[in-house]
């Protein structure tokens, strides 16, 4: 993947807000099917990755932080409906199984 390739991500699989980020900035890609926390069950597995919060546009995905904990990692969801099939295939190939 080249550094100019972007990927559209969401904070949650069913979130309404999305943001474009550099695909190469995504780390720890994996398919996740368990919700964790108090969220409802996922209908199927979704591709997730981690990114440093200072690599997303300011205020994107409803994320605002300041102070000593900046930057920190965020988990983001990558949906096939938001991204081209070839990009999704390359990202899935990078995912941990």
Image (spheres, grey):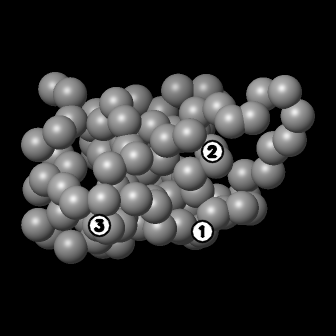
Q: Position of residue 54 (x, y in %)?
A: 64, 48
User: At numbered mark 2, what does the secondary structure look like: helix, strand or loop?
Assistant: helix
**Left or right of residue 34, residue 31 in this image:** left
Task: Name the quadrant of the N terminus.
Answer: bottom left
**Left or right of residue 75, residue 3 in this image:** left
Q: Residue 5 carries which label?
A: 3
User: At numbered mark 1, what does the secondary structure look like: helix, strand or loop?
Assistant: loop
Q: Which of 66 and 75 is in front in this view?
A: 66
Q: Residue 53 carries which label?
A: 2
Q: Quadrant location of residue 65?
A: top right
Q: Residue at x 38, y 44 (%)?
A: 26
User: At numbered mark 3, what does the secondary structure look like: helix, strand or loop?
Assistant: loop
Q: Which mark is residue 17?
A: 1
Gap between marks 2 and 1, in whole Å? 15 Å
Q: Where is residue 61 in the image (x, y as percent from the top left)?
A: 64, 59
Q: Residue at x 30, y 36 (%)?
A: 29
**Left or right of residue 11, residue 90 in this image:** left
Q: Earlier in the sequence, mark 3 or mark 2?
A: 3
Q: Quadrant location of residue 86?
A: bottom left
In this view, the mark in front (2 or 1): 2
Q: Position of residue 92 (x, y in %)?
A: 17, 46
Vertical side of 17 occupied by 45: above or below: above
């Amino acid at each position: 993947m080249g550094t100019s390739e972007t990927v559209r991500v969401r904070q949650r699989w069913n979130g309404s807000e999305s943001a474009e980020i550099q695909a190469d900035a995504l780390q720890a890609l994996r398919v996740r099917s368990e919700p964790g926390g108090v969220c409802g069950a996922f209908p199927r597995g979704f591709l997730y990755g981690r990114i440093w919060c200072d690599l997303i546009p300011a205020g994107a995905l409803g994320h605002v932080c300041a102070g000593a904990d900046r930057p920190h990692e965020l988990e983001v969801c990558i949906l096939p409906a938001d991204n081209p099939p070839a990009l999704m295939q390359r990202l899935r190939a990078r995912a941990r199984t």
